[in-house]
Image (cartoon, rainbow, N blue to C red):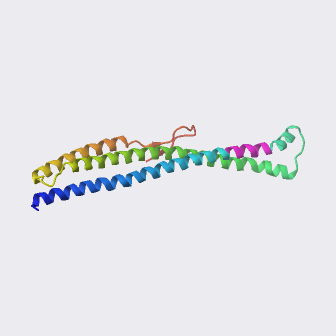
Amino acid sequence: MPRKKILGSHVKRLLSGVSDHGRRHLAEVETDLRQTEVLLEEAIEKLTTSFMAIHTAVGDRQGTINMLLAGQTPSAEDSERLGAMSGEIGLHVNAAITSMQFQDMTSQLLDRTLKRVTGLREFLDTVGAHGEHILPESGSEEIVDLLGKVSMALAIQSLELRSALRKAVNQQHLESGDIELF
């Protein structure tokens, strides 16, 4: 086989292989990220359950509070549980709020990561599409020209993806302050 045909065949196989391999792996990454999102939503449901447990704990101690309001003296055990309640509930509420802030930031990161994966898939699609145009008969000049076009298209896609993903991840939906990540 002449040198030109060998060069074209190798470049085509390389570009197609990179594209196919990358697409398969990125599809798995997307699946994993989507599963992570489902798990985070489940974690939020558990946080809601925790808040309800806090509410129940407060309700359980309401009898002692009512005794105090009525001017009665609670037992030493009631007083001790009532005194510990504020700190215990405060810890649970702080942990829940922190978890919700983490969920919000994680959702933003997942969204950004999914955009990145989509951009990378499109990037690899471009490599694969250009690779299909290389024939075993393609001359060195044609291959060089095509590779230049591929490089230009990939550079443009890369810049577009980078500018779309440049934003910092910020806390949203909570009124307890701002957190910025990255």
Residue span colored magenta? 51-60
Q: Toward the viewer: 18 or 175?
A: 18
Residue 57 belongs to the span the image colors magenta: yes
Residue found at the far right of this picture: 72
Residue 113 visible, this angle: yes
Q: Toward the viewer: 178 or 97?
A: 97
Residue 50 x, y percent position in the rendering: 67, 47
Image quarter hosting the N terminus:
bottom left
Count of residue discs:
0
Give the quadrant of residue 7.
bottom left
Q: Toward the viewer: 72 or 100?
A: 100
Side of 28 where 3 appears, left or right:
left
Residue 75 x, y percent position in the rendering: 88, 50
Side of 112 where 45 appears, left or right:
right
Residue 86 x, y percent position in the rendering: 73, 46
Side of 136 where 58 appears, left or right:
right
Q: Residue at x 84, y 42 (%)?
A: 63
- Main SS category, magenta section: helix
Q: Residue at x 43, y 49 (%)?
A: 30
Residue 125 x, y percent position in the rendering: 29, 47
Residue 2 belongs to the span the image colors magenta: no
Residue found at the far bottom of this picture: 1
Q: Residue at x 57, y 37 (%)?
A: 175
Q: Residue at x 32, y 45 (%)?
A: 122
Q: Toward the viewer: 104 or 11?
A: 11
Residue 98 visible, this angle: no
